[in-house]
Image: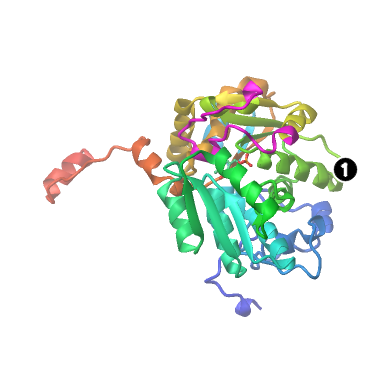
Amino acid sequence: MDAHIDRRVMPRTIFSPVPISNSLRQHLGNRITSIRQWRGLIEEYHKWLPVSEKTPIITLGEGATPLIPADHISEIIGRDIKVYLKFDGLNPTGSFKDRGMTIAISKAKERGAKTVICASTGNTSASAAAYARRAGIKVFILIPDGYVSQAKLAQALVYGAEVITIKGNFDKALDIVQAAAKTYPVTLVNSLNPYRLQGQKTAAFEVIDVLEKLPDFLCIPVGNAGNISAYWMGFSEYRKAYHGQKLPHMMGFQASLSAPLVFESTVEKPSTLATAIQIGRPVNRDKAVKVKQDSRGIFAMITDAEIIQAYKLLGNTEGVFCEPASAISVAGLLKHRYEVPNGSTVVCVLTGNGLKDPDCAIQNNCAIFHKKLDPDIKEIVNVLGF
Ligand SMILES: *Cc1c(COP(=O)(O)O)cnc(C)c1O
């Protein structure tokens, strides 16, 4: 029966840590009971997305990222609090941006766009480049000179974007692309593009599909504040199928020197080693402020040192390598753990892959690194401690 399944292709079905209940099976049809190739989030969740028969689907199989139980972190926190990591760094270009980009580019293609543009701290440009080129669309990228990691820049170049670096920060780059998209025939694919958040909300669907309930808390990094708004939209829409369960408290974290939502004012010169969230003027600010209020959540700031501590902990104890901006959700949870009641279920969103920023990894780890030993068995065994 299975002969037609190509085993070289990893089936990316949603996994479930508990047996699939009859009510969920009924709700989802037989969608998650069979082993087959995941078709990308537009096809899988099309009923919930603004697409039609006419929409060309530009996909790289994004979505269906694992929800990983974080047993070590749960143990540190104690009190029967169960922590999960939504590892969105396992998307095709290594960040959650692919969720928004599959639909932003599909809709641009549907409307006959020939060119798209974005400003980026790195991950948006990698994702925009991949999806746009797959769709045969030209892509321009504006990035702040010197603040985008080599790995992210490498992606944009390999995917065939036209890259422009500017002597200015992300906020400035965004002003320029916004102005350009207003006047010229070029489609903006930053998170001001409403389709981006529509795609990103599917991460909340996946969390619910796997947990079979809504989490009590969601911890998430906040840069332009698009993703926190998208998760909230996803939870709000999808819970209707779950008998209107209580919505989670949304815990948004920003780096101390890059925390406009915490200070409630623009930060002119944002600075943090978590470059993906080095943003002083979040474009989705108003949405995110409302999410915080409606969810009775918090915005809080976390120092770079605390981010790195969580980054190392994730690698060293959970076996999860995420980028520094992502580790802030765990750093934030650890810092604010006493705001989480006993027995809660908490999901920390890990937005990007650790390989995105190898410099940070080489500089911040708990490894012991023995360098340039003689190729001699005695010397090596000595190091092994025998
Ligand atoms: C874009 C990005 C963020 C910030 O998301 P916003 O929607 O801008 O708040 C966080 N982490 C990573 C890795 C990102 O690429």
Q: Is residue 76 left or right of residue 100?
A: left
Residue nearest the observer in this picture, 359 or 245: 359
Q: Is residue 122 magenta?
A: no
Q: Is residue 277 magenta?
A: yes
**Picture quadrant of ligand 1:** top right
What SS does tag 1 mark?
loop
Residue found 73% across the figure and 30% down from its top = 289
- Counting from the top left corner in percent of width and height, residue 168 is at 49, 39
Q: Amino acid at mark 1?
A: His
Residue found 72% across the figure and 39% down from its top = 229
Residue nearest the observer in this picture, 381 or 306: 306
Q: On the rendered image, what quadrant is the C terminus found in?
A: top left
Query: Residue 273 lies in what quarter of the image?
Result: top left
> In the rendered view, would you say 9 is above or below 369?
below
How crowded pointer 1 is (Cα within 10 Å; few <14, some 14-19, many 20+) is rated as few
Q: Which residue is mark 1?
A: 243
Residue found 46% across the figure and 59% down from its top = 157
Q: On the rendered image, what quadrant is the N terminus found in?
A: bottom right
Residue nearest the observer in this picture, 296 or 375: 296
Residue 77 showing in the rendered view: no
Main SS, magenta residues = loop
- Counting from the top left corner in percent of width and height, residue 385 is at 21, 38
> In the rendered view, would you say 31 is above or below 202?
below
What segment carries the magenta color? Answer: 262-287
| Colour convention of the picture | rainbow
Residue found 44% across the figure and 44% down from its top = 145
> In the rendered view, would you say 119 is above or below 215?
below
